[in-house]
Image (cartoon, rainbow, N blue to C red):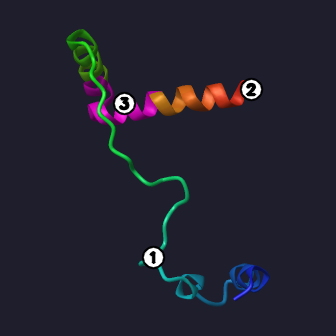
Amino acid sequence: MKAHELDKRFDEGKEEILDAFDLATAHRPNQASKRVNVDFPAWMVDSLDREASRLGVTRQSIIKIWLAERLEARAGGR
């Protein structure tokens, strides 16, 4: 199916367009995970844990959020 045909079906709203996709093989570009190991000083881990607890998220989440924010800000400033 061509993109314009899919757009037309979506705009008309007459049928479910998800039936046109194989969701078992669907993936988001640039979202594949890759494991990395980083050593932090104990004081930094303690600070990360306190902030993560305050926000109600995991340590891993706070690290990913902060890194993403920094990288996006850097990319936006170029």
Q: Position of residue 46 (x, y in %)?
A: 22, 15
Mark 3 is on which residue type? Ile
Query: What secondary structure is marked by label 1?
Result: loop
Q: Residue at x 27, y 35 (%)?
A: 58
Label pair 2/3, CB-CB below 8 angstroms: no
**Which residue is at a point 37% across and 29% down the rendered structure image?**
63
Q: Secondary structure at mark 2?
A: loop
The amino acid type found where label 2 is placed reads Arg
- The magenta segment: 52-66
What distance separates the C-alpha of mark 2 from that of mark 3? Answer: 25 Å
Q: Quick one: label 2, few (<14), some, or many (20+) residues within 10 Å?
A: few
Image height of 12 relative to 26, above or below: below
Instruction: Point out the frontmost of discs 3 and 1.
Output: 1
Name which of mark 1 and mark 2 comes first in the sequence: 1
Packing grade of label 3 (10 A; few <14, some 14-19, many >=20) is some
Task: Name the amino acid, label 1.
Answer: Thr
| Label whose residue precedes the other's in the sequence (2 or 3) | 3
State the CA–CA distance, disc 3 to disc 1: 29 Å
The residue indicated by pointer 1 is: 25
